[in-house]
Amino acid sequence: MQFFSAQKRFTRLPLAVEITLILIVKIALLTLLWKAFFSEPQTKKMRMPTELVEQHFLSQPPAAPLSIPSSSSHPSPSETRQ
């Protein structure tokens, strides 16, 4: 009695060649998808000057602490009920 049945493979190629072909097909499909959807912006207004993007990412953010609203500018719930 045989417990492990040999499954028929899709091709009669050696396993390494079969895996290589599958990887090539996957890379080709991913490249086509990237070219179709992500290669360049859809509109011209989505483009930004490189210098502006560099300045935004490389500049340090201002070191301003978070301001906590004072109670005089925002009345508490008990003050609004009076």
Image: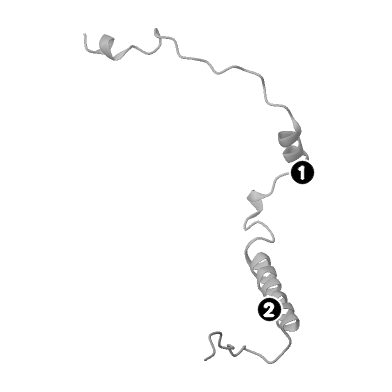
**Mark 1 lies on residue:** 50
**Mark 2 lies on residue:** 22
Determine whether, in the image, residue 44 is placed left or right of residue 59.
left
Residue in front for this viewpoint, 28 or 61: 28
* Image quarter hosting the C terminus: top left
Mark 2 or 1 closer to N-term? 2
What residue do we see at 76% from left, 34% from top?
58
Q: For marks 2 and 1, give the one nearer the viewer.
A: 2
Q: CA distance from mark 2 to mark 1?
A: 38 Å
| Disc 2 crowd, CA 10 A, few/some/many (<14, 14-19, 20+) | few
Find the residue positioned furthest to the left. 82
Residue in front for this viewpoint, 21 or 61: 21
Determine whether, in the image, residue 8 is placed left or right of residue 60.
left
What residue do we see at 74% from left, 38% from top?
52
Residue in front for this viewpoint, 42 or 7: 7
Amino acid type shown at disc 1 = Thr
What residue do we see at 70% from left, 78% from top?
19
Q: Are marks 2 and 1 in contact (CB under 8 Å)?
A: no
Which secondary structure, mark 1? helix
Determine whether, in the image, residue 58 is placed left or right of residue 76.
right
Above or below: residue 7 compared with residue 51 = below
**In x, y percent, where is residue 23?**
70, 74
Quadrant assignment, res 21: bottom right
Which secondary structure, mark 2? helix
Residue in front for this viewpoint, 23 or 15: 15
Quadrant assignment, res 71: top left
Identify the colour scheme used: one colour
Above or below: residue 60 compared with residue 12 = above
Mark number for residue 11? Answer: none
Amino acid type shown at disc 2 = Ile
| Disc 1 crowd, CA 10 A, few/some/many (<14, 14-19, 20+) | few
Quadrant assignment, res 74: top left
